[in-house]
Amino acid sequence: MHIPVLQKEVIEYLDVKPNENFIDATFGLGGHSKEILEKNAPKGKVLGIEIDPELYKKFSIFNFQFSNRLILVNDSYTNLKKIVREHNFGPVNGILFDLGLSSWHLEKSGRGFSFQREEPLDMRYRKENKNEKLKIKNLTAGEIVNRWPEKEIERILREYGEERFARRITRKIVETRKKKTIESTGQLVEIIGSKRFSRKTFQALRIVVNDELENFKKALPQALEVLDKKGRIVVISFHSLEDRIVKNFFKENSKKGLLKILTKKPIRPSIKEVQKNPRSRSAKLRGAIKILL
């Protein structure tokens, strides 16, 4: 069901070696972690962090497969430093962030992540979420489209979805909700006009519901702090705003003498990989190495 994106490149830029320790900050279905654990045997460990409680329970079986070399934690990478300390995990030789949405969320979660399926407009990774920036608890996509002011909806579609038809889509949402509550993904797709043009709107709603960009900004400095000297950080992003955060973070810390950038330009999937896994087409990988004494 799930094909890890840029798997060969992740191993290469993390420079995985036997008996080293790595953090998979976005465990998901465990594809990247499995590959790392096969390369860092016999004593190397992986600390896997998975925010979704349901996904965490589903794949905790990996603990047995790798003889407890995998420490799987149900938490957010915004608590990275705390998680590392609580599990006395180290030295940390590398950290991976794969910011893509897992196939399970799209196909199995039933939470409205996919515009291809008829599901409730939820889009939360966990029920008890909190948007710190907006000071809102347990926000759902349904609440945004049904209750938020027109200007705010247009702003997030434009800003987080980079949707050039943001105004038109927002007007149709507001017109529709005056007549009836917008409850499902199917209703939202109908408002937008087609599945083909729904991707950016769904993306924007998901990012806001889970406060993804702000959370990622909180995690990066912690990643740099917990890394051992010459430890590596690798990030796979799928959105220009995510990629910009990574690029700027690497650049700023390179100027400070804390990081050496390994990728002058982002690494993209090969044509062969995109043909095999079309969801990889927008992926960008950036890597850096810690040089702090």
Image (spheres, grey):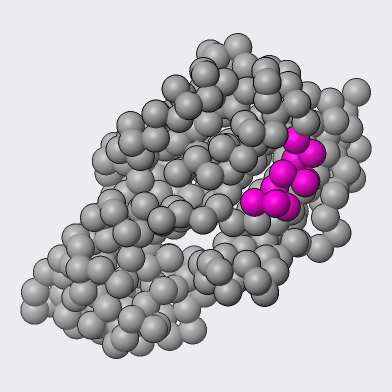
- Residue sitting at x 68%, y 25%: 41
Percent position of residue 20, x then y: 73, 24
- Magenta stretch contains residue 129: no
Q: How many marks?
A: 0
Closer to the camera, 185 or 254? Answer: 185
The quarter in which the N terminus is drawn is bottom left
Percent position of residue 100, x then y: 52, 55
In the image, residue 142 above or below residue 194: above
Write the start and end of the magenta stretch as one range: 7-16
- The answer, for residue 236, to whether it is visible in the render is yes
The quarter in which the C terminus is drawn is top right
- The answer, for residue 171, to whether it is visible in the render is no
Percent position of residue 181, x then y: 12, 69
Specify the principal SS of the magenta part: helix
Q: Is residue 273 left or right of residue 169?
A: right
- Residue sitting at x 31%, y 86%: 194
Closer to the camera, 21 or 158? Answer: 21
Closer to the camera, 102 or 68? Answer: 68
Q: Is residue 131 left or right of residue 188?
A: right
- Residue sitting at x 55%, y 53%: 4
Residue 42: name its quadrant: top right
Residue 172: name its quadrant: bottom left
- Residue sitting at x 83%, y 55%: 263
Q: Is residue 16 left or right of residue 38?
A: right
Residue 229: name its quadrant: top right
- Magenta stretch contains residue 15: yes
Percent position of residue 285, x then y: 70, 56
Q: Which residue sits furthest left?
A: 179
